[in-house]
Amino acid sequence: MNFDNFFKARVDALHAEGRYRIFADLERRCGWFPRAFDHRIGSEVTVWCSNDYLGMGQHPKVLAAMQAELRGSGAGAGGTRNISGTSHAHVLLERELAALHDREAALVFTSGFVANEAALSTLAGSMPGMVVLSDAMNHASMIAGIRNSRAERVIFRHNDTQHLAELLAGIPEDRPKLVCFESVYSMDGDIAPIGELCDVADRFGAMTYLDEVHAVGLYGTHGGGIAERDGVSQRLTVIQGTLAKAFGVMGGYVAGSALMVDFLRGHAPGFIFTSAMPPLLAAGALAAVRHLRESGAERATHQERVAVTKRRLAEARLPVMPNDSHIVPVTVGDAAMCRAASDLLLREHAIYVQPINYPTVPRGTERLRITPTPLHSDADIDALVAALDAVWRDLQLRRAA
Ligand SMILES: *Cc1c(COP(=O)(O)O)cnc(C)c1O
């Protein structure tokens, strides 16, 4: 077999479908956010699609903590968590994350993806007869964990508690069950009815696993996510989060009972057989979590900026997909057009919004996913709305009714 021909055919297919991925070439500069230098066009752009939702990636407390830890303990962790890789920074971070979710314990992984893959494959894979009930819109990292567990998987319709109840009712009572879902879904920005999903899971004696990646730091009085906001943090078997989005650094984690965390610590290959996150990242994440537990100012400004952006886009009859979260999806509905719109925004308006195409979202729902931050000014919003309005006119894209 000629492997190069295989690779070429598959890459050509991506081009033909208009979903060949073109990466940005950004240089984030401290103090500039949400602006960055874009090496594709050799000038400054305003970034409107970052998951550094609150700008914590450049927060002075985070930078100071990382610089101090770098000077103090050096570059890497020096081992796996079990063999010489656990630093005091990891211990403090796990304590802080447990407190963030008001749970007994937490366990840090090298990324949110790894946390989902490792925790789900281990939880679902270690109990004979396990059935996993997975929301239809769950993230690829959860799907990877469920697949790798080799447990039976049943998909329930997105956020549909009734469908979940029907499916659970059809599974023998003596089989262990695990219900997996997210709080804020990253592409549509809709929010799960966590309490109601827990009601159904409880009725059938199922464990619950909640991915709060797009909510931690952003919702709840202390940034504990939608579960904190809704007062249901205690009801979940596992709360999973990332340190790389609103907390601005890198890493992932799970929180829950001390027993559950102890079980994963001793059994999850994705935790055991990999080097620990560098202590400087743990120190930076710790500073970010600590700050956002105390301060609600970033969350309040974030929500206000989101509301203004949504209102202004709607006034310009741009097709904003409605939701109750901080994610602002603007529908294009075609992969090639979505890429063209993104190109025009970059080259004519110095605005960077990455096109979101299949398989990240279903075909026909291709979109620009806009993420306002507390650091986007009124002038930035004016410029965004004017630029999108021009692009929609130039490409004759569909407007809102
Ligand atoms: C980004 C993301 C992850 C993975 O988190 P990382 O820390 O970026 O690896 C997990 N779940 C969801 C829903 C995500 O969007």
Image (cartoon, grey):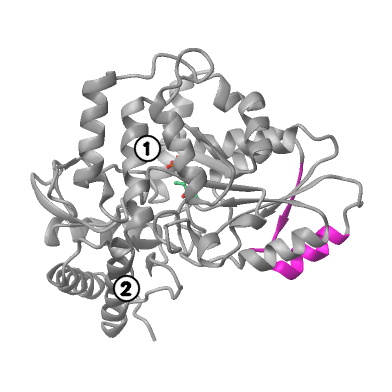
N-terminal label among 2 and 1: 1
Residue at 58% x, 52% y: name it: 138
In which quarter of the view is residue 192 placed?
A: bottom right
Q: Is residue 175 left or right of residue 395?
A: right
Residue 65 lies in magenta, yes or no? no
Give the vertical position of 44 relative to 313 (above or below). Answer: above
Kind of residue at disc 1: Met
**162 inside magenta stretch:** yes
Type of the residue with mark 2: Leu
Q: Residue at x 9, y 50 (%)?
A: 44
Circle 1 packing at 10 Å, graded few (<14), some (14-19), many (20+), is many
The residue sitting at the left extreme is 43
Residue 212's spot in the image, x, y percent? 51, 53
Decide which of 310, 283 is in the foreground and name it.
Answer: 283
**Image location (x, y in percent) of residue 208:** 69, 52
Ligand 1 neighbours mark 1 (CB distance < 8 Å): yes
Tell me: is circle 2 under 8 Å from ligand 1: no
Range of magenta residues = 152-169
Residue beneath disc 1: 250
Kindly identify which residue carries mark 2: 397
Q: Nearer the viewer, mark 2 or mark 1?
A: 1
